[in-house]
Image (cartoon, rainbow, N blue to C red):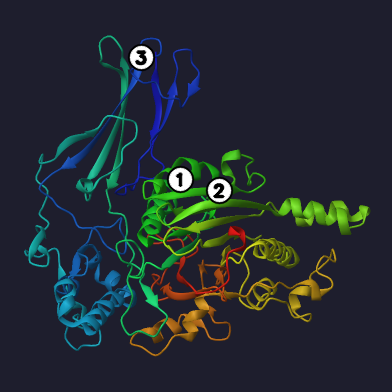
Amino acid sequence: MLSVLRVHLPSDIPIVGCELTPYVLLRRPDGSITTDDVPESVPLDGFYLRYKWFRIQSDRKVAICSIHPSEQATLQCLGCVKAKIPVAKSYHCSPRCFSDAWQHHRILHDRAASAVNENGAEEEELFGRFNNSGSGVINTSLSGSTSSMGQSQNLNNGSAPLYPAAITERSGGETWFEVGRSKTYTPTADDIGHVLKFECAAVDAESKLPVGHVNTIMTSRVIPAPSPTPRRLIPVSGIDMMGHLDSDGRSASSGTFTVLSYNILSDVYATNESYSYCPSWALSWPYRRQNLLREIVGCRADILCLQEVQSDHFEEFFSPELEKHGYQALYKKKTSEVYNGSPYAIDGCATFFRRDRFSHVKKYEVEFNKAAQSLTDAVVPSAQKKTALNRLLKDNVALIAVLEAKFIADKRQLFCVANTHVNVHPDLKDVKLWQVHTLLKGLEKIAVSADIPMLVCGDFNSVPGSAPHSLLAMGKVDPMHPDLAVDPLGILRPASKLTHQLPLVSAYSSFARMGVGLGLEQHRRRMDPTTNEPLFTNCTRDFIGTLDYIFYTADSLTVESLLELLDEESLRKETALPSPEWSSDHIALLAEFRCIPTSHQDKSSQ
């Protein structure tokens, strides 16, 4: 007889939009143990598995804490209600929770107040009117700015009641409603605040009756997916008004285009050991993939350069999902498996572009392993080749795409977009620099064949001021740079060869050149004044600094606007990245560009 031995969920905290997939351990009639499904359509020795999902329904309605989504809310910030800030952000589970979150929470009020100050009555319907207190509409007293959910009043979203006051649960007042009959279930908004129950039973194919014990799992209450405050597109021209993405993700001018670069944190690296401060449910791939997709699609960039994209996630999720949003995909995976030897655990670089804005012309794949083989064959003595290859073969890659713009009508305009992920090891400074130099030399060859604007995006695992960053931004490396002291193979000598002729500039350095305008100073404060780069693009408990960049050729492109940076106040003070709101340990960078008019004719069209 078929029997169910064990049933459990990877996480007992269900989240809206994140598929729940129970683990079911079976004993077959022959005594063997398996996790394979036994559907009704293919019974095993006259038995199959039947699944059911239920949710509890009662008069009791529950609001969820915006800071600790696994906790029930007990109070609400009335300042958020009056300001018409999204109501889900107004709930807190305790006065201590509200007090601890105040530094982050007040940013919501300040932003809403800023929008009113900048736009006046036009924003009144959206944000409401504000008084002149230091934090918008909220009073400095917690008791004066929150309402207890244990009182008799309803919670409100504006003037419309959202939830009735919490009441004592009636005995026997619970009803279980069936919501699914498959092994997996994806919670919906209707499930928020409710407990789910999963049933699994072996069933006789003839009688349709369960045989043996019916296994059940009860989850905790379903929580909404946390939603971070959207990041805005900031013009770098010194205009006072903050920029916003339009419905197509671009400014009103059709002559511009946007590029996003984002290390999304591969699932194989997102372990509880590495990120113990992040709740396990927020580290799970079913949750993170939906949150990442929501963030990426929300940016509506014309070109996406993603790093740490696992090959199976590219094929099964990102490529089909982004295709629905009008993107065409290119992919280059690393040249060997990661950690566990599984071919599905290989991550790589994925570049997507909007089909209505660009067409694909050519693709180049850079495998640094192949370049390492050529280098050692050419310059390393035979006795040292094994040592050299052990140091240089790190499986990193770059993906270069040549795209043709469809939004420029008067001429054929090509763009070259490079997407890379440079080696991470902090002791391999020579390898990082060699990889960047190899990529740049390849891009120079493309530049010789065509007058073509270039974008170089990625996670370079190099901080501002390092030798790789200097090579990118300055076109050379100072012979006395301390990074050059690490060169056991002699591959960096002479230092005079570490040059390139591409006029590359870091897009985010444009923040340092912004004019004076309302609110622009806060963006400068998120920049390092000595390097003109962001204070950080990677933020974990062990490291905070800038590793990611978007470089562009300044003789052919100019920066119009930039996606605003996060600051440490934007991150909840007791955590780092990833978090329930931000599903990678990196932040996304996005820049809007415009072509500089030129009289040069595209050599490739001659």
| Residue in the image at 56% along x and 60% along y | 417
Query: What amino acid is found at the position of numbered circle 2 in the picture?
Result: Tyr
The residue indicated by pointer 2 is 331
Q: Amino acid at mark 3?
A: Phe
Mark 3 or 2: the one toward you: 2
Tell me residue 459's x, y (percent): 58, 63
Q: Secondary structure at mark 3?
A: strand
**Residue holding disc 1:** 319
Quadrant in the rendering for residue 162: bottom left
Do the residues under discs 2 and 1 have CB atoms within 8 angstroms?
Answer: yes
Q: Nearer the viewer, residue 111 or 511?
A: 511
Q: Residue furthest front?
A: 606
Snapshot quadrant of residue 492: bottom right
Cα–Cα gap, marks 3 and 2: 44 Å
Q: Is residue 512 above or below residue 599?
A: below
User: Which of the two marks, 1 or 3, is nearer to us in this view?
Assistant: 1
When the figure is inspected, residue 444 is found, relative to residue 133, above or below; the finding is above
